[in-house]
């Protein structure tokens, strides 16, 4: 592999420095917090509008708070290759999650505009504002609105201060009554491609700066309630106990075992509540959560069924009662094979081995799976850490990812792409 020299790092260094500048739009001094429709979100949107216009794009904030920039093709009004990611963050976030995908796409357009390059298609860069779901109990509002699947009932949802989504949008300068009007038709978007940090350790473990994403994992979330009998810790013999926590611990280990039983499947217990929670009382009630993910919906559903059956067997053997509730389910989003191949070719032209991998995290790209072909490029992040101020990339990797993305755009050909219709399943 040919590593870039110091003189070649203009693109990566510029992107790296702009990410630092953009991170200043935060409600918390000394750390990054930028939630949907906040004053800091508005300030970030305004700065991004300026950068887009300087890059030769027509730019605006749409009815749901997305920042949209369009760089026309050789023929005005041509269908677009849409790129972008989100600019909202979790609390005390890293500066690359989401933001990198927006600013890298913008930097590509800057280079094309500087060189006077136009393509047979337009390029649209979109900065979505609601991927993390931190402020309101809903996610992907921006991407779903463009994809035509926005749920109008969510406008009545309120944040912890009692402010409705409708009111917050109005305060941001948007017109919620026009959200339906921003939905795109299939013929308007050739593909959606998102560059994003991996948020996992696979690329770092492989020693690779970038990879081609094959799918965004489907997810099932469940809550489990285990009921035993709370009793005195000193007076009840071990063989006569109905210890809810001991039973739950065995169940949680079963979840872990099943998650490791096949490639690309993961299963996690993320929260545990124990009652009554006293040092000298046998636990009588335990509630815990399960999160099961896979790029294969059939594998995920099979794992959930296996876990459900195993938990029932453990409960029966230990004499406890259980209740299992499905709280969330999202289908996997498979990336278009043609885009996976094209991204891989761009990686190969950069002199790098091509690594294909699924995404275990959700992304705005998921919202487009019924509208247009979807692709993703992953960028290595240090130790796989994300949603954390320790989130980090290198200037060298920023530069490589920029060059791969620019190469992909220059070679993008919509002709081989199969349109999403009845002959191609979406998950």
Image (spheres, helix red, strand yellow):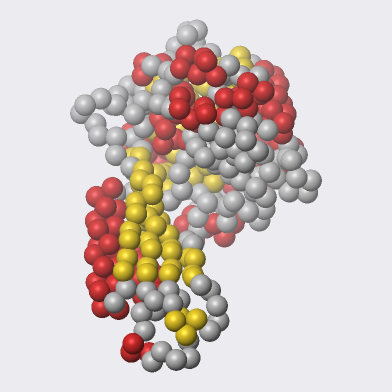
Q: Pick out the residue farthest to the top.
A: 76
Residue located 55% across and 78% down the image: 278
> Is residue 322 visible to us here?
yes
Relative height, residue 44 to residue 31 (above, below): above
Q: Is residue 150 above or below residue 178?
A: below
Residue 55 locus on image (x, y percent): 65, 20
Q: Examine the image and state in which quarter residue 129 appears.
A: top right
Number of numbered labels in the structure image: 0
Left or right, residue 226 beside residue 204? left
Quadrant position of residue 109: top right
Answer with the quarter of the image where residue 165 lies.
Answer: top right
Quick one: 31 or 58, which is closer to the camera? Answer: 31
Q: The C terminus appears in which quarter of the rendering?
A: top left
- In screen coordinates, is 225 left or right of 75? left
Residue 297's x, y, as percent? 28, 47
Q: Position of residue 365 (x, y in %)?
A: 44, 35
123 is higher (above) or lower (below) than 314 = above
Let me know if residue 403 appears in the view.
no
Question: Which residue is located at x 42 percent, y 18 percent?
Answer: 184
- Whole-percent x, y for residue 28 in the image: 75, 45
Q: Would residue 173 be found to the left or right of residue 133 on screen?
A: right
Residue drawn at x 50%, y 37% is 138
- The residue at the point 58 percent across, 30 percent down is 164
Q: Nearer the viewer, residue 368 or 129?
A: 129
Q: Residue furthest left?
A: 423
Q: Out of 42 and 85, give the one closest to the viewer.
A: 42
């Amino acid at each position: 592999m040919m590593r870039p020299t110091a003189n070649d790092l203009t693109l990566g260094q510029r992107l790296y420095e702009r990410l630092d500048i953009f991170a200043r739009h935060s409600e918390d001094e000394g750390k990054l917090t930028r939630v949907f429709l906040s004053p800091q979100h508005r300030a970030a949107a305004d700065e991004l509008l300026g950068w887009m216009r300087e890059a030769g794009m027509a730019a605006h904030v749409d009815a749901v708070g997305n920042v949209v920039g369009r760089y026309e093709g050789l023929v005005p009004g041509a269908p677009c290759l849409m790129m972008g990611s989100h600019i909202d963050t979790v609390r005390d976030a890293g500066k690359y999650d989401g933001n990198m995908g927006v600013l890298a796409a913008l930097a590509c357009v800057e280079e094309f505009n500087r060189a006077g390059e136009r393509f047979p298609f337009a390029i649209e860069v979109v900065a979505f504002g609601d991927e993390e779901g931190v402020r309101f109990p809903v996610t992907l509002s921006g991407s779903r609105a463009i994809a035509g699947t926005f749920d109008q009932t969510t406008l009545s949802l309120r944040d912890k201060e009692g402010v409705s989504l409708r009111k917050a949008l109005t305060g941001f300068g948007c017109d919620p009554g026009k959200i339906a009007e921003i939905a795109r038709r299939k013929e308007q978007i050739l593909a959606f491609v998102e560059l994003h940090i991996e948020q996992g350790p696979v690329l770092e473990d492989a020693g690779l700066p970038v990879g081609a994403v094959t799918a965004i994992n489907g997810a099932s979330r469940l809550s489990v309630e285990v009921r035993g009998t709370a009793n005195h810790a000193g007076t009840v013999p071990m063989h006569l106990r109905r210890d809810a926590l001991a039973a739950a611990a065995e169940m949680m280990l079963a979840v872990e075992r099943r998650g490791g039983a096949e490639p690309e499947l993961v299963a996690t217990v993320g929260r545990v509540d124990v009652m009554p929670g006293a040092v000298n009382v046998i636990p009588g009630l335990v509630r815990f959560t399960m999160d099961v993910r896979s790029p294969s919906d059939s594998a995920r559903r099979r794992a959930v069924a296996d876990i459900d059956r195993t938990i029932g067997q453990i409960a029966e053997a230990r004499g406890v009662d259980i209740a299992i509730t499905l709280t969330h389910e999202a289908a996997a989003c498979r990336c278009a094979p043609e885009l996976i191949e094209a991204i891989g070719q761009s990686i190969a032209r950069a002199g790098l081995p091509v690594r294909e991998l699924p995404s275990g995290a959700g992304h705005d790209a998921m919202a487009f799976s019924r509208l247009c072909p979807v692709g993703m490029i992953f960028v290595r992040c240090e130790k796989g850490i994300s949603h954390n101020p320790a989130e980090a990339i290198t200037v060298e990797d920023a530069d490589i990812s920029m060059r791969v993305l620019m190469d992909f755009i220059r070679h993008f050909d919509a002709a081989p792409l199969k349109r999403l219709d009845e002959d191609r399943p979406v998950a």
